[in-house]
Image (spheres, rainbow, N blue to C red):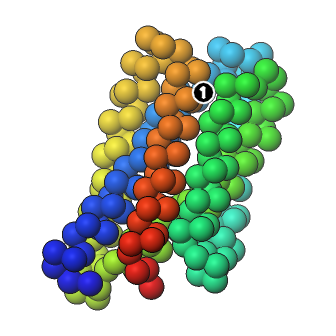
Amino acid sequence: MEGVHMRKPIMLMFTLSLLSSLCIGLVGPIYPIYVLKRFSATILDTGILYAIFCVVAAAFKAPIGKIADKYGKVRVYLVGVVLGIACMLSYILASHVAQLYIIEFFSGLSYALERPALLALMADLTTRKNSGFLMGLFDSAYDLAEATAAVLSVVIVSQFGFEALFGMCSCFEALSGILAVKSGRRIKWR
């Protein structure tokens, strides 16, 4: 895949990365506020909840990466997307802080399903000659979207509430899944 033929798949991967990072960026900055305002939770709860997400994601990324290699990166990514949508909608329905601990476990699992598959799909599009540059661009797009989303999250929550934010994140997740399915039919991944 060289030149013009490579541009579409690379742009698609940037788009998937942007949509994925919008979810993280939108929720991340306001999550402690959501936990403290919505539930009778403590600052300790917010730290433990974030730690659960991180530990679960870290524990499952490598094994799930191996599963993605065996059964298909797009498939594994889609499982993560579906789980991510369920988690975002669960935040809307949660009524007790204990439920957040369960949601964070599955949210970490969702991230562990999505991120290695997304990185592997991007790696499939690189060559030895351009791999560092393209991976740098890919990761920069992720960081920029997350930074932009951090500012937007405050505006969304202050104007429309937490439900709107979590609903919007579900939509971004769904859109990334739809794009992944469409691309999976047209792009020949390694």
Residue 147 placed where, x, y %?
35, 39
Q: Which residue is mark 1?
A: 32
Task: Please indicate whether residue 165 sits to the left or right of residue 48 in the image.
Answer: left
What residue occupies the far top of the structure in this picture? 159
Residue ID at (47%, 74%): 120
Figure quadrant of residue 112: bottom right
Residue 135 visible at all: yes
Looking at the rendered structure, the kind of residue marked 1 is Pro
Residue 45 placed where, x, y %?
74, 30
Task: Please indicate whether residue 89 sits to the left or right of residue 132 in the image.
Answer: right
Residue 69 placed where, x, y %?
59, 81
Label 1 secondary element: helix
Classed neighbour count for the residue bearing mark 1: other residues with Cα under 10 Å, few (<14), some (14–19), many (≥20): some
Residue ID at (55%, 38%): 170
Above or below residue 100? Residue 82 is below
Residue ID at (16%, 79%): 3
Residue ID at (61%, 67%): 76
Residue 21 visible at all: no
Above or below residue 184? Residue 114 is above
Question: Which quarter of the image is occupied by the N terminus?
Answer: bottom left
Above or below residue 47? Residue 12 is below
Residue 87 placed where, x, y %?
67, 40
Task: Please indicate whether residue 71 sits to the left or right of residue 136 in the image.
Answer: right
Question: Which quarter of the image is occupied by the C terminus?
Answer: bottom left
Above or below residue 38? Residue 26 is below
Report how many numbered discs are placed on residues in the image: 1
What residue occupies the far left of the structure in this picture? 3
